[in-house]
Image (cartoon, coloured by chain):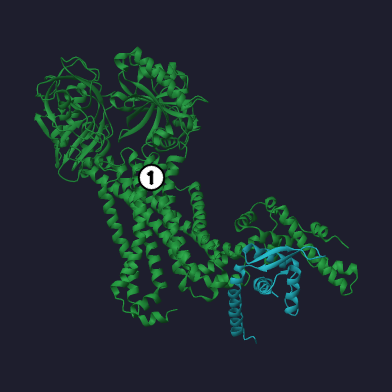
Chain colours: A green, B cyan
Amino acid sequence: MRDWKQFVREHLPPLELSGAREAEIIEELAQQLEQSCGEAIARGASREEAEARAAAQVGDWKALAAGIRRAETPVMRQAAMRAAASMPEPWREAFHEDEFRKRRGGNMFADLLQDIRYALRMLGKAPGFTAIMILTLSLGIGANSAIFTVVNAVLLRPLPYPDSGSLVYVEENNLSKGWPHFSVSVPDFVDWQAQVQSFEEIVALNRKSFRTSNGETAEQWFGIKATKGFLEMVRVQPARGRGFADAEFEQGSDHVTLISDGLWKRAFGSDPAAIGRRILLDGESYEIIGIMPPGFQFGGTTRELWMPLTFTPEQMTQTRGSHYMSVMARLRKGVSVEQARQEMNGVAARLEEQYPDSNKGWGAGVQGVQEATVEDVRPALLILLGAVGFVLLIACANAANMLLARATVRRREIAIRTALGAGRMRLVRQLLAESLLLALLGGLLGILIAFGSTKALLSLKPDFIPRVQTIHLDGRVLLFTFALAVVTGSLFGLTPAFGILRESSASTLKESGRTGGGGRAKLRSMFVVAEVALAFILLVGAGLLVRSFGQLTAVKPGFNTSNGLAFDVPLPPARYASATQQTAFYDQVDARLAAIPGVEGVALTSMVPLGGDDELYDVGVAGRPEAADQPSALYYLVGAGYFKTMGIPLLAGREFTPQDNSSGPRVVIVNDAFVKTLFPGQNPIGQRVQFGRNYSVVREIVGVAASVKHYGLAEPTLLEVYEPFAQAPRSGMTIVLRTNGDPNRLLPTARQAVQQVDPEQPIAYPGTLEEYLNNSVALPRFRTLLLGVFAALAVILALIGLYGVMSYSVTQQTREVGIRMALGAQNGQIYRLFVGRGMGLVTLGVALGAAGALALTKLMASFASFLFLVKPNDPATFCGVTVLFAAVAALACWIPARRASRVDPLVALRYE
Amino acid sequence: MQPELKKGTAEVLILSLLENRARHGYEIAKLIEQRSEGVLEFHVASLYPMLYRLERRGWIEGRWLEKAGQRRRRYYKLTAAGRRALPAQRKTWREFIRAIQRVAQVEG
């Protein structure tokens, strides 16, 4: 007698089950064969014949093993094996699926095609459902792709220099005065360069604009002057020509420049002979030594000249208190930002000891360039990313809800297919194929939405976003969107798919969809609660930002922003070297501008409030001993009539007049904060103060002006001191015009007026005072607007979800409603039934949302400047949002309830 | 018969055969073949996976039993869940067969 166990063991491929279970199965199969063999012999067959017949019973051993394996393996492992099917050949070998393939008469690919074809047919049969699903998903995915596009360009993509991760800014700071980031003085930089070991290169940079003229039109070009090692630090070499020679970092031989590829094309027609040519910048001759590669940027898109920065001997030793340069460095290999920071702290402390007069209180800081570049916008972008994440979750919950509702309708279809022998995995795969297809279509539309909304976003001109010009859809965004669609599709597709499988297939065939599973209804309600909670959190966040923005814009800037125009008139020092020349030029321009019809006032100033420039000096009272913490004041150099032109009220004393010139007594005007700090309770008029470069010069206060907001509406008021232009003239001034109509209309005339005085003199940075104000709140406006849009989107999606569930439950309970009405229920009771049920879900969602919002808005408030004069738990916002939400949610419940109340009892009782 | 159809019917057949008494695998296969007069024939390759599947689902339960003078055998019996599922399965098939009859005008 043959050993059948041995026989089975030899023929059956490994089952990959536990040893005991496998042995059990082998034993059972062996008995089957043994018994059928025994019976054949009993019927008279020869032993050989009987054994052969029994052995042939199995036929396909591989199929048997695969069948057993499938029967014995939990569903999730089967899913993993399915996934393995799409893997490379050697991996797939590990998961024998021969039996499966044979039965289908095809391969996995053909199956996939079949799934997709079937899915398309099913979706095509329900176009309304399909359209709403795709729209919902595309809104969620599109919003994410749009924000990711920005995040990708701004936060993720490295700066366009090799190894940009090791580039750092080195700054000075004076924490006792509240200045965490401050420019660097030349002597301090020179000492750093000599002493610090952490850096491969350390380079001081100075922005500079140049006037240039081709004889007809005057233009302004912008450049960066950099000390030795600049090209080595950025690790970019000129595409044509050469880099700087060491000798060119000596005073006198430093008139050479590299130009951008763009400037080379624009101004020199890409002529290779441009290298070696000399150009006139601010009246001085510079030799072009090289052209940087296309796309090279340093210092911003407008910077197109890079030239050596050199210092005079006295600059290197005498001007330690004059901070005006930026410093960038490349970390030595293996040195961390933290190590560099520590070394810089030590160096700064030594300098503080060595030069207490100028360096007392001054420290040094090191910050990664990438990190510093995005410092201001990172919190806003991360919050927006979180917000769109919420929107996507809501969209997913909605999609899952719709699939669940649809699954109820499709129960019969699925029951029949199960009864006919469709495997569970086959069904799950089929349902997943449908949801993935929906998600991918949604993703496709989402890309379009992202493309459109990114464009719309950029049309808001968010210039405060660093590298804004590099924002575009790239491969990474497409990949992100694709991944998002797949994850989304699986997320919302799996729940209903497994829900269907859990149900006994047989019990559903007969039933109509009316009494759908109770567990499923609970699941759908939970989804709605989650949606409401998420949407509520977003709405609270948006509400807080809107309130905060309202508070911010209610702040008065302290000057009149309507009908004001400002532009720079930077005089080249080479041609306007003396104070007399400078005053003469601006006097003439002033007179011509004042003569333009429509101009009501003209004034000179060294800077415009909210314009982003600043100049600060320590100030002291003449005759008083210097205090340890000498206060600093913003320094404005302004022309006669400045306060009247700007609309800054004078609180005491007088305005500057043309008589406040070099031959008159030295005078100043200060602001009320200045008086409060230095002359509390005294009459400031006639008091004498000292400040600035000529600290020894004593000036007399002749007027007190109201404060202006200099750095921003949310910023605290600083001390301000104004000096008349004619008593300290300089070359780079801004002109402010007050007009009696649209100020932009007068810009061309104003330009002509300037060029009538000097035909080679350009004007730069024209802008209305209104624009200055708007730009100063651009970032808060941007994030408020965006979060508002996302919150609105979230609320709409959540309401759709709520409406869907309510309207579905009305349909389900038509018969119940009919009975109640037949028994005498009034319309009002029916309303109460459904609206009450829906609002119960909303109440739960809002309660959860409020708890989440309390936690998350605290996080939002922890980012500086996010909330202005609004507490993160602002009761008004929470109440307002709750009322708003309740109102729209009640509407979403009321519409289906109304349908229920119109049910005809007779029809309803027959309803099937 | 079509393999898909056969697989679908197998469940109800196995459950029905186990309704009144426990049986072992070989017996089940033989009974199906005999009672269907040879129309339905289950090979080892499809029968055993089906048994294991039903066991996993908790509708049937296999147990090793030893009778005097014989090797131990694995007997399957209906569980409470299987007993509850059987009427629904039968009903489904009754519905289905009637539907086929009505549509395809097959004589009953």
Q: Secondary structure at mark 1?
A: helix
Label 1: chain? A
Q: Give whichever of A355, A353 is nearer the camera.
A: A353
The residue furthest front is: B68
> Residue B68's spot in the image, x, y percent?
80, 65
Q: Quadrant of the N terminus of chain A?
A: bottom right
Q: Is residue B87 left or right of residue B24?
A: left
Q: Give whichever of A791, A219 is nearer the camera.
A: A791
Specify the quadrant of the image occupied by residue A509: bottom right
Q: Quadrant of the C terminus of chain A?
A: bottom left
**Crowd rating for badge 1 (residues with CA inside 10 Å; few <14, some 14–19, many 20+):** some
Q: Is residue A192 visible?
A: yes
Q: Give whichever of A287, A299 is nearer the camera.
A: A299
Please say if A534 is above or below A694: below
Identify the residue shown where x is 20% and y is 35%: A736
Amino acid type, label 1: Ile
> Residue A522's spot in the image, x, y percent?
44, 63
Specify the quadrant of the image occupied by residue A749: top left
> Residue A343's spot in the image, x, y percent?
44, 20
Residue matched to label 1: A383
> Residue B51's spot in the image, x, y percent?
69, 66
Please say if A767 is above or below A588: below
Identify the residue shown where x is 64% and y is 54%: A84
Specify the quadrant of the image occupied by residue A430: bottom right
Q: Is residue A715 left or right of residue A455?
A: left
Q: Is residue A105 visible?
A: no
Q: Give whichever of A302, A360 is nearer the camera.
A: A360
Please say if A169 is above or below B19: above
Q: Is residue A124 left or right of residue A315?
A: right
Identify the residue shown where x is 60% and y is 74%: B89
